[in-house]
Amino acid sequence: MEKVILYIRKKISHQITISSGVKEFIQQFARSPLSIIGLSIILVIIFTALLSYQLAPYNPIEINYAVRFTPPLRKGHILGTDHFGRDILSRIIHGARASLWAGCISVGLAAIIGTPVGIFSGYLGGKIDSFIMRVMDVLLSFPSIVLAIGITVSLGPSLENAMIAIAIVTIPDFTRLSRGQTLSVKENLYIEAARAVGTRDLKILMFHILPNILGSIIVQITLLIGDAILTSAGLSFLGVGVQPPTPEWGLDISKGLPYLREAPWIPFFPGLFTVIAVLGWNLFGDGLTDILNPRLRD
Amino acid sequence: MRDLLSFIIKRFIMLIPILVGVSLITFLLTNIIPGDPAQMLAGEKATKEEVEALRKKLGLNDPIYIQYGRYLNKLLHLDLGYSLFKHKPVIEEITQRFMATLELTTFAMLFAFTVGVVLGVISATKRNSAFDHIARIWATLGISTPIFWLGVMLQLIFSLYLGWFPFSARMGVFTKLNKFTGLLILDSLIARNIPALLDVIKHLTLPVITLGMVQTTLISRITRSSMLEVLSQDYIRTARSKGLAERIVVFKHALKNALIPVVTVGGLNFAKLLGGAVLTETVYAWPGLGQYLWFSITYRDFPAVQGCVLTYAVIFVFINLVIDILYMYIDPRIKY
């Protein structure tokens, strides 16, 4: 009975520690207005992406030559129409999906692959570590967008392949970070203690090392999503990402270029929304850096 | 000096496995193509017989390691394949276009360093002032802006609306200039051709600002934090207490030391600049490697894409080598 009471007390105190930690985190976050702006932008984008079919006033791929090149705030088109008479606002709302998926899925995929590889590399050391790091050096020898172009051209132009390409070029960022963090965490006494009592390596990696480096990984994810959105838009701009007529911000900028003089709003608005989306992730990432990993700041 | 020489030799030896890895990746790019590489290389209009002939000619029926060995051998002879769109060796097109990219990236980097360092120093010396806040907001906006969109907007405002700068290209159609080096600014200086020089500068301005902008924001942020760190050092306090003018303290004592991390990070970010050059050249119809890559993508000219990707990686690896050497030269405390 006494053991049960002790166990419950321990659990409760653990819960209290966690909830006070979360409270402190929220308090610190609330003190940074720029981070709140960033988070608000992200939430609006997620909301827009999820409810795009309900929010968009028109079908984003419906061609209507009668209203082509309509300037903003005319004929019921808030942001105007493009060269096919498609409503730009509706295309931007639907384009939020591609942008969000490209950013989150590619960086998420890179984190899922890159982090364990980095942790294993740092923990095991020796020849395996050297080999993995040389592979990462090779991947880092390419300007990321150039390698992403090569991969997407090989796999075939599409949003899914662009996401795979961005994930591949982003993996080294996670591998190097998690390896570095593991190298420092594994020197702690509690890791030695865990080893001394016979804890298996996999358990040490999962329950002792991973939780300690998770903060840095989360910060890295938020900071890289903005980059991934820019790369994905760049790939679509060059014609190797999302294919027409699917709405995507980078693609819409490129398709508006021949009409730049007559209808500058066609490339202007998709670009503006890309800036806002990336800004949101960058501000949010900066805020998290301040709280979770102040040493990384600047 | 001997240290530096042995370091350079060591770094050259370390380049070999990296370059082999790079070649392996570019080789794999052909082999991960879903479907038939021969069909892709021959183009969509090729007949079955043509595809089969090409497969035999390229040895695509051989084991993969033999194919890779053959690819490596070709690379050692500077053979990057044959362009399907331009109908000439890829290496020829790349060498023709290389100087245009070199000129653009070099001036973009110079622009980024000059503007970035000046802004960073002002931000650090006027910490928490309105200028500092505006510079920080501008820096965050800068890294959030798609480079190709920035290019398009600059074209719209400064070329189409105001007419201050040309819309695209490297030089006016009617400008005459003898090319010696392929670097047009240098060529016009050598030829003492002032009208051509002015024309080239006008054409270079918008692409350089577009490409350099992101780097400017990064460099200004690093300069600011590095300057703040250096300005809090004891020797700066000593310099000030000696009664030296603030200008001398900032520029002669602080900036020199603050520049070390700026050079390193700025150098490492050269990759982004090379990547950004692909997009900038596409927007401004700049006849460099990036535009060639874009053409190759548009016309599904796979050997050319592969050749460009490899060239970019090789350039990048060598730039990093130069930066490492420069870093050791700038900061003699560094020992490898």
Image: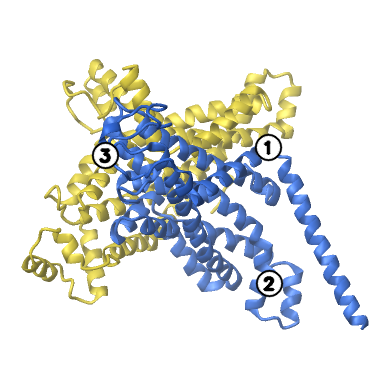
Asked if badges 2 and 1 are on one and the same chain, I answer yes
Residue type (three-letter) at the residue carrying disc 2: Phe
Q: Position of residue A106 (x, y in %)?
A: 46, 57
Query: In the displayed structure, would residue B274 be above or below residue B19?
Result: above
Q: Which mark is residue B288?
A: 3
What chain does mark 1 sit on?
A
C-beta proximity under 8 Å, tags 2 and 1: no
Asked if badges 3 and 2 are on one and the same chain, I answer no
SS at mark 3 in the image: loop
In this figure, which residue is indicated by the disc labeled 2? A207
What chain does mark 3 sit on?
B
In this figure, which residue is indicated by the disc labeled 1? A33
B16 or B275, which lies in front? B275
SS at mark 2 in the image: helix
SS at mark 1 in the image: helix
Chain yellow in the figure, letter: B
Q: How packed is label 1: few (under 14 Cα within 10 Å), some, or many (20 or more)?
A: few
Residue at 11% x, 50% y: name it: B87
Residue type (three-letter) at the residue carrying disc 1: Pro
